[in-house]
């Protein structure tokens, strides 16, 4: 599936993952349960935000579950923030894409909302949709 590819292939992740004015300048993936990922976002002032995580579950073309509770090889992160659950369900000629985020605490959820979580994920999803249309 094109959506699954966009979530797992580094060359595609860098094209859609971050809402403007931020960009994704680097992505690494080891797409398997226990595999790690690194996505580096960059702000307009050049500030970089590396985001490390581990895949908890991978069902190709159906489901991705990842968390920032670990950075790699099951090394705990300094500050766990979220777990993401992404599903891709076939619906005839289309795919139902569902993204769920589970924050570690209510305070983490509030902090993410203040960072522009809802609008940012909406913009990123629009970019994802546009990219999929070109594949």
Image (cartoon, rainbow, N blue to C red):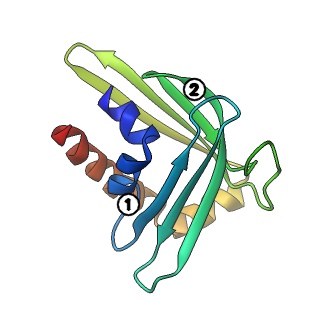
Left or right: 51 with respect to 41? right
Q: Which residue does the image show at 65% across and 55% down from the upper left? A: 52
Give above or below for 76 relative to 60.
below
The CA span between labels 2 and 1 is 27 Å
Mark 1 is surrounded, within 10 Å at the Cα level, by few (under 14), some (14 to 19) or many (20 or more) other residues, namely few
Image coords of residue 85 (percent x, y): 55, 35
Task: Report the front residue among 66 and 37.
Answer: 37
Q: Is residue 79 left or right of residue 21?
A: right
| Image quarter of the N terminus | top left
Residue 112 position (above or below residue 88): below
Residue at the spot of label 2: 58
Position of residue 56 in the picture relative to residue 73 (left or right)? left
Mark identifier at residue 119: 1
Which of the two marks, 2 or 1, is nearer to us in this view?
A: 2
Residue visible at 62% across and 39% down?
Answer: 66
User: In the structure shown, which secondary structural element does the residue marked by tag 2 occupy?
Assistant: strand
Residue 48 occupies quadrant: bottom right
Residue 11 percent across, percent down from the top left: 37, 49
Label at residue 108: none
């Amino acid at each position: 599936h094109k959506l699954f590819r966009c979530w797992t292939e580094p060359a595609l992740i860098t094209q859609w993952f971050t809402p403007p004015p931020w960009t994704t300048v680097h992505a690494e993936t080891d797409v398997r349960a226990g595999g790690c990922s690194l996505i580096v976002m960059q702000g307009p002032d050049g500030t970089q935000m590396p985001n490390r995580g581990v895949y908890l579950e991978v069902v190709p073309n159906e489901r991705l579950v990842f968390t920032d509770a670990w950075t790699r090889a099951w090394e705990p992160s300094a500050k766990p923030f979220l777990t993401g659950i992404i599903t891709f369900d076939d619906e005839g000629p289309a795919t139902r894409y569902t993204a769920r985020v589970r924050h570690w605490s209510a305070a983490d959820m509030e902090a993410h909302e203040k960072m522009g979580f809802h609008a940012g994920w909406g913009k990123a999803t629009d970019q994802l949709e546009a990219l999929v249309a070109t594949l």
